């Protein structure tokens, strides 16, 4: 498994567009780091983001996550 993904790779994993991925990074909904001037997204951060989405949506519907 790759630990750090480019924004494009992260977007592909989430099945969203590159622009949307950069928007999530800009709004700090997904944390990223810089490596030699290039933006990278930790794989674990994508997992955490999806877990937050699931938790938020299950809270809204009154279901347990």
Image (cartoon, rainbow, N blue to C red):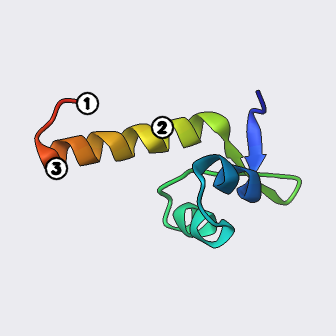
Q: SS class of the residue under badge 2?
A: helix
Q: Earlier in the sequence, mark 3 or mark 2?
A: 2
Q: Residue 17: name its quadrant.
A: bottom right
Within 10 Å of disc 3 (Cα), the crowding (few <14, some 14-19, many 20+) is few
Label 2 sits on residue: 48
Q: SS class of the residue under badge 3?
A: helix
How far apart are the alpha carbons under marks 2 and 1? 14 Å
Within 10 Å of disc 1 (Cα), the crowding (few <14, some 14-19, many 20+) is few
Left of 18 or right of it: where is 46? left
Left of 52 or right of it: where is 59? left
Q: Earlier in the sequence, mark 1 or mark 3?
A: 3
Pointer 3 with pointer 2, Cβ within 8 A: no
Q: In the figure, 53 relative to 27: above or below?
A: above
Label 1 sits on residue: 65
Seen at 25% across and 30% down, the residue is 65
Q: Residue 39: name its quadrant.
A: bottom right
Left of 60 or right of it: where is 23? right
How far apart are the alpha carbons under marks 3 and 2? 18 Å
Dot in front, 3 or 2 = 3
Rendered location of residue 25, percent (x, y)? 58, 61
How far apart are the alpha carbons under marks 1 and 3? 11 Å
Rendered location of residue 3, percent (x, y)? 74, 33
Label 3 sits on residue: 60
């Amino acid at each position: 498994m790759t630990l750090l993904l480019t924004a494009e790779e992260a977007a592909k994993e989430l099945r969203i567009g590159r622009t949307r991925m950069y928007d999530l990074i800009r709004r700090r909904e997904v944390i990223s780091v810089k490596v030699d001037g290039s933006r990278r997204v930790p794989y674990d951060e994508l997992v955490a983001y999806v877990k937050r989405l699931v938790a938020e949506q299950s809270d809204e519907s009154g279901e347990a996550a």
